[in-house]
Image (cartoon, rainbow, N blue to C red):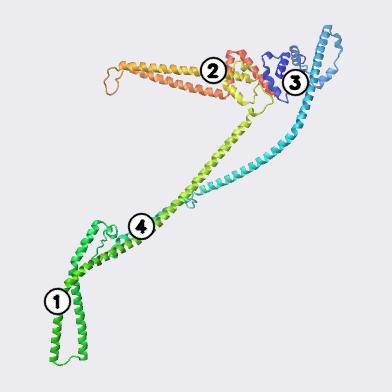
Amino acid sequence: MNNGKKLKETLKRLDYPEAHELQAEAFDWLFENDAVAPFLDWFIDNVGPANVLSKQEIAEFHTLESSGDGVLEGEKLNTALRSSNTGDEDDLSPEKLKDDIEAMEEELHRAQKNRKSLLQLRNKLSLHHTSLTHQLTKLTPVESHTESQYKNMLENSQEDNFKVNTSLDDLNKTITELVALSAKSLDTQHAPFMSQQPLQAFHQSEESYTQALKQFTKRQFFEGIAQLAGHNEGSRYELLEVSEPGSLVIRGEQCHVTEADCEELARLKTLYPASQRGYMKALLEESRVTAAHRLAEKRLDSISHQLYPRDVHSLSEKLEQCERQKNAALNQAVQIWESEIPRLLEVNASLQATHILSGDYNLKVARQDYFTSKQEKLIELLSVQRARKEFLDMAYEVEAHHHRATHRLMTASTKLLQQDLTMHHRSMGFLSDPDLNINTETRSTVDSRDQTVNRLHEMIGLGGKQEQQLFLTYSGLLEDSRVFVNRLSSLRDNLRLAWDSQEGQLAALERNLTQCENMVYAGSTTKDGQPVLTPPAILDGIAQLERMLEDLTQGMMDLMGDYNNKLKTLKSDPLLSEQRQLFVYFFTEPVQLKRQLQSLSQQLQALTIS
């Protein structure tokens, strides 16, 4: 017989009210407490009907209290008992003596039985103590080994804790510095990041540089070409057309450029003889003037030195001689001018084309060299400007890369810390769960401190027979769980049937509505839609019915919302649920209400004892 059954039999022997309705398994958990178990064993072995006051004795005691004579207590009661007269024992009747002897014999028999049980219990405890001592001897090295392992694990845990604290301090310091740096970045005058620096001065300098580069390009490639090619001299003929850049290249010239060069060359060939004649005339005139100048100087020198003769006849002869020399020279010059010069001009004209073409080629080469040098200079300047811009872009990209890396590190740190915090809360929740406590023996009753099973019992909704129990049992919980599963299955089946029925009713309603529309709107040819129902009273009735239906639906929804709120309140507060059940028992089952109150009082007494 287990301890719960022994306690139940003792309560029956003491005539405890409704002791036959109690379950023995409900008292097993009381013997798990080492502080209460010895008292319960003593109570089972020593307390009997003789230790219980009868109703008559209780009534006499209450009468004595109400009489006002006073009740002896403590030391006064012991003194009165010692000094009381024992002569009344002679007046005892034989029947009473016989009853006293039988009671004493029963008490002696029970004491002997208790003595035997105590001896057996002592022997069992001695054997148990010996086995425990032997086991303790075996566990001593295991305990020392476990203690050493515990110390090592504790040291490792402390080292890990120190490392974690150091890492957290470093992380906190770094985050503090980042926050301070971000707070400092709000000041635009002392912004630490390059992306926060104003770029107005840079843009202005780049704009000035671009304008200067534009002016340099115009001056080197457009405005200074005329000075380079000698375009400001109108007396020169040139094949280089400065207004057309396509004519300034050497290779890859277009056809119209070549044709224009040919036409210009033909024109120059045509103009060459006349220009050369004019040139030669100018040279002759220059030579004549130069010779006349030298002759005049010579004559002046001769006159000044008196080298000429004074005789007129000699002078006349010398003058005639000079005239003859002059005429001969003129005749010779005319012959050369009319016969030799045209032939030489024709020969020189063919040679002049080569000279012109070589000069044009040299001019184009010089122009191309000029363009190449200026283009390289311009490319160098543009490369410098582009390098500045790309350097700025690279600096922004590097800073953005570091910002993104910092953001990723911060996000990863936040996620890791959040995961560690979640795992810590979960571990603490697991450790605080009484289900994780290892029990030495299997319990059949539910511990009142086990909130998980108690909440499960509340969700399942135990009622009826189980509500009369003083404690919850696992077997009853399993049985009610099976009932709950069966109810859930039946509710799902009913819901499925109701859904199918609703679908069928909706389909039938749609078919009837279609038939009604066909009957009402048959033969309608209006373009603005279906005609209005006649008479108007039907339409008003339908509108009123729809409003009533909407009001009814809204009222039902409000009622359902109120019901759900009250249901949630009752489910969240078990005291309200218990109070509601007590109110129901008060109006329907007073006997059940009395039993429920007795059960609650027993629970309170059990909690007081524990």
Q: What amino acid type should be assigned to the residue bearing mark 4?
A: Gln
Residue under label 4, please give it.
211
Q: Residue at x 28, y 60 (%)?
A: 248
Residue density around tag 3, few if under 14, some if 14–19, many if 20 or more, within 10 Å: some
Mark 4, secondary structure of its residue:
helix
Residue under label 1: 335
Residue at (43%, 20%) from the top-left corner?
Answer: 553
Residue that mark 3 sits on:
41
547 to 199, vertically: above or below = above
Percent coordinates x, y for residue 157 in the rendering = 65, 40
Query: Which circle, 3 or 2, is nearer the viewer?
Result: 2
Cα–Cα span, label 2 and label 4 = 89 Å
Give the mark, 3 or 1, whose residue is nearer the N terminus: 3
Closest to the observer: 576 or 606?
Answer: 606
Left or right? Give the position of 206 relative to 25: left
Q: Disc 2 vs disc 1: which is toward the camera?
A: 1
Amino acid found under the numbered disc labelled 2: Arg
The amino acid at mark 1 is Gln
Mark 4 nearby-residue class (10 Å; few <14, some 14–19, many ≥20): few
* Mark 2 touches mark 4? (CB < 8 Å): no
Q: Kindly identify which residue carries mark 2.
A: 487
